[in-house]
Amino acid sequence: MPPALRIEYCGEWHDLRAGEILTIGRDADLVIDDNPELDGCLLEIFEEHGMWWIASTAASRIVQISDPSGRVSTELLPGSRAPLVFGPTHVVFTAGRTTYEFALHGELPYLASATSAELRPERVELPRLTHNQRLLLIVLCEQSLRRPSSGGGDFPTSAEAATRLGWSLTAFNRKLDNVCDRLDRAGVAGLRGGRGNLATRRRVRLIEYALAARLVRAEDLLLLPDPVVAGA
């Protein structure tokens, strides 16, 4: 029988014991937000056969699960489930223009220090990003990085992000294409453009991955230009 699992969201802690099921969503045991674009019940966490599991009850939303370093991650597709093996485990997902994140703590099989190629040979080898490519990721993730304790943050449109950086929209979109192409070639799924992959969904997927894989961190916010004050 595994020990209690602890769920941390927005600075609050929720304990889950073997034999119990915790639902997570807009109308669930753990209410993430009243965002109408969020599933009423998005996830379930439970114990089975001596292990903790996380299962998706979403209609179409993809959830990113990773170890703290982001080096080992997986996508939880609607209707699928996965064992919780890394302590802590980070869970990231997006609803509308808001990205949410919470963490699962407990005596799980692997500590973060156990993360290695031996545990996941197919793990993504991330490319080296240019300064401007990093700026692009930072500005897309800015609100989530500034308010990590809130459990989520709004992401900007391409036009808003371009203005924040002082770039033209054309230049921003070109750099966005470059970042997505580089990560796609490295094996990150969901970033390839084309039919069925709308620009908004691709941008959301990029933000989810950048946060889960820790491609950008709070200290990187210092690289952004000072925001323009209206009327100044």
Image: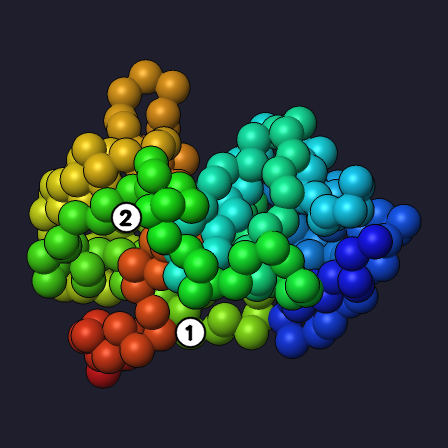
> Residue at the right extreme?
19
| Corner quadrant of residue 139 | bottom left
Q: Is residue 23 above or below residue 103?
A: above
Which residue is painted at 22% across and 56% down in the image? 136
Q: Is residue 196 visible?
A: yes
In this rendering, would 138 be left or right of 134?
A: right
**Three-letter residue code for mark 1:** Arg
Q: Judge from the rendering whether residue 204 lies leftward or rightward of residue 60; answer left or right.
A: left
Local SS, label 2: helix
The x and y percentages for residue 229 are 28, 78
Q: Quadrant of residue 38?
A: top right
Which of the two labelled residues, at mark 2 and mark 1, occupies the earlier sequence position? 1
Q: What percent of the width, then of the height, locates residue 225?
A: 19, 75
Mark 2–mark 1 distance (CA, rounded to whole Å):
19 Å
Q: Which mark is residue 146?
A: 1
Tell me where residue 2 sits by quadrant.
Answer: bottom right
Residue lying at the far front in this picture: please name it.
118
Residue at image point 73% right, 47% down: 51
Q: Secondary structure at mark 1?
A: helix
Residue depth check, mark 2 versus mark 1: number of the one nearer the observer: 1
Q: Residue at x 44, y 59 (%)?
A: 114
For label 2, the residue is: 158
Q: Alpha-carbon neighbours of circle 2 within 10 Å: few (<14), some, or many (≥20)?
A: many
- Residue at the spot x=36%, y=25% of the render? 197
| Rendered position, 197 above or below 82 | above
Q: Is residue 178 left or right of residue 34?
A: left
Q: Position of residue 214 (x, y in %)?
A: 35, 61
